[in-house]
Structure formats: structure tokens, C-alpha cells
Image (tube, helix red, strand yellow):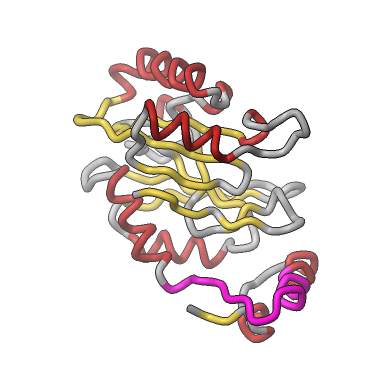
Amino acid sequence: MKHLTPELISRCNLDDLGREQLEGFADAFEGCTIERDYWPAQRKQFFEKLFQSGDGFIDLRAIRKGESPRQKFITIGDWDALEGFIEQYSNRDLYFGVAARFRKGGRLEDCGNIRALFVDLDFKNFTDSKGEVRDSWVWSDLEAFHQADIIVRSGGGLHVYWLLTKPIHLQERGPAFKTRLRTFASILGGDKGSAEPSHILRIPGTVNWKYRQPLREVTIVRI
């Protein structure tokens, strides 16, 4: 565990706004800490559940409003390259394509094996009459009926994954898999716009920069 010190903040490669917000966070909560050291090992475990050697490439994206997205394709298993990408673009929203790419492209026609069904749940769909998020509604629905294998807090909701017994090759069964994704999204109240086989979701252990006050970390809840 590392203390959120000015020295650590200076090494985070943040823009002026990001640095100001982190410094304000540290001032407001004396003695606060931020856990970082465990993330590479946990990320590796996360990605090894979703990809296997021979699947091809992982499509990585770094996105910041007002700028062109950064994109990189890493060979599955090259976790040093993954960590390098995360470190290089730590001041951007970071995503990965859930489906492996058999060639370097981000469209459905570039996708090969996919090893999980997934749903993007937005917390704004689980609010009470006052507009406040009711986490208990989300957890009750997931735990009682769907026993997900992986759950990630995205900073604004949940990314939920159900691992498949066998991978589905999207060049052979892409339309059928898309229909299944949309069915899951409909049942769970998920984002139907995210129910695309080539969709990208947030990388665990990174920051959701969409919500600036406060900044929100993308965390693994279950793996």
C-alpha cells in the first residue's frame, strides 16, 4: 500500500486538472491511502479468464475528451505491454475489447474468439424516487438470479461477465452472439448500446475520468 503523497502524485503523469483534484482529495482526507501494488497481478488474473494463448490480440484504447483515441493491439500473454500501456495513458479512460482480435482492427469483422457474455449496468437505472443509487437492488438481482463469474465496478455502474464453457468464434456466430448479449442486457436492465460483440469495457485498476468529483477507480468486486 502506498500513501497518496505529493511525490506519488507528481509521478502519475496527470494533467493540471487531475493533479489538482488528487491533491484536493489528499488534503480532504488526511492519512488516506491508495492501493496500487496488487493491481498488475489481479489484472493478469482478470485477463487470463477472458483470453487464452492463441486467441490473437487484445484491443486496448485510451480515450480523453477532445483528443483522438489512442489504440494498441497487444499479443495475448504480453502482460508487460499491457502494464506499459496503462502507465503511459494513466490520465485517460482506458478500455479493452472483450472479444479477442484475430487481426489488428476494432470492428466485428476483426473479432475472433470471445469467452464471456457481458452486461454493462449503469447505476442510474437503479435509483430510488430521490435519484439516489440503491446498490442493494443491483446486488440482489445479480446474486439471486445470475451468479456472475466476474464483476467490475466501472465507477458509474457494473461490468458483469459470465464465462463460457467453450469460446464462441464471432466470424462464425457473431449475429447469434449479439442477440444473446441483447437478451441479457434486456433482462438485467443493462445498456443495450453496449451489447455488441466488439464492444470495449473499462480496464480494472484504472481511473474513470468521466466523474471528476470525486475521481472513481475501476475496481474488481469478484473474480
Asked whether, in this view, residue 126 is left or right of residue 107, the answer is right
Identify the residue shown where x is 43% and y is 73%: 37
Q: Nearer the viewer, residue 36 or 61?
A: 36
Placement of 111 over or under 211, stated as above or below: above
Where does the magenta region start and end? 22-37
In the rendered image, residue 87, in percent from the top left (x then y), is placed at 52, 67
Magenta span includes 29: yes
Which quadrant of the view contains residue 13?
bottom right
Please name the residue shown 78% across and 72% down the image: 24
Tell me which residue sits at (48%, 78%) in the image. Answer: 1
Q: Position of residue 116 (x, y in %)?
A: 33, 33
Q: Position of residue 120 (x, y in %)?
A: 52, 33
Identity of the residue drawn at 63% across and 49% down: 63
- Residue 172 vs 23, above or below: the answer is above
Residue at far bottom of view: 7
Return the x and y of residue 188 as percentages of the image width and height: 49, 23
